[in-house]
Image (cartoon, helix red, strand yellow):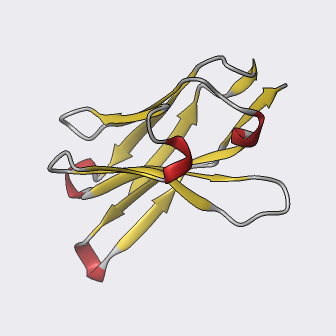
């Protein structure tokens, strides 16, 4: 089992920055992928950024060049540095972890609200 707890959300003006953090506990060593998803009101939950245990990163096109994902070596935390925020980035942001154990299992945090005012 892996437990994920996000922090760092809040209200920021357009053009501002926020850094989201996600603390992972439990079977951290089993984690193969960590990432961030977001869900805006009335929309589905979509991937924002992912990072694998070999350091490979991926971003959705709308955040490339503005957001940076990172993970500590022990896989106890994943971060999302968000710069040049836009009102369209307003959403609940969820931390995500995946392990290939047990034929693949995924874990989610409770979510943290990010609101960008124009």
Q: Is residue 63 left or right of residue 29?
A: right
7 lies above or below 37: above
Residue drawn 19% across the image and 51% down it: 53
Quadrant in the rendering for residue 112: top right
> Residue 103: x, y in percent?
28, 82
> From where the camera sits, is residue 95 visible?
no
Residue drawn 39% across the image and 54% down it: 2
Residue drawn 77% across the image and 63% down it: 43
Number of on-image labels: 0
> Residue 32: x, y in percent?
24, 58
> From where the camera sits, is residue 28 visible?
yes
In what quadrant of the picture does the C terminus appear?
top right
115 lies above or below 106: above
> Residue 49: x, y in percent?
44, 49
Quadrant in the rendering for residue 98: bottom left
In this rendered view, identify the residue nearer to me: 8 or 62. Answer: 62
103 lies above or below 74: below
Which residue of the protein is positioned furthest toward the left in this rendering?
54
In this rendered view, identify the residue nearer to me: 93 or 63. Answer: 63
């Amino acid at each position: 089992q892996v437990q994920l707890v996000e922090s760092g959300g809040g209200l920021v003006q357009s053009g501002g920055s926020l850094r989201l953090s996600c603390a992972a506990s439990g079977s951290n060593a089993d984690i193969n992928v960590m990432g961030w998803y977001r869900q805006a009101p009335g929309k589905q939950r979509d991937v924002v950024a992912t990072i694998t245990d070999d350091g490979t990163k991926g971003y959705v096109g709308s955040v490339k060049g503005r957001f940076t994902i990172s993970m500590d070596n022990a896989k106890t935390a994943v971060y999302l540095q968000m710069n040049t925020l836009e009102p369209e980035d307003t959403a609940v942001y969820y931390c995500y972890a995946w392990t290939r154990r047990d034929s693949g299992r995924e874990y989610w945090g409770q979510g943290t609200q990010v609101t960008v005012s124009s």
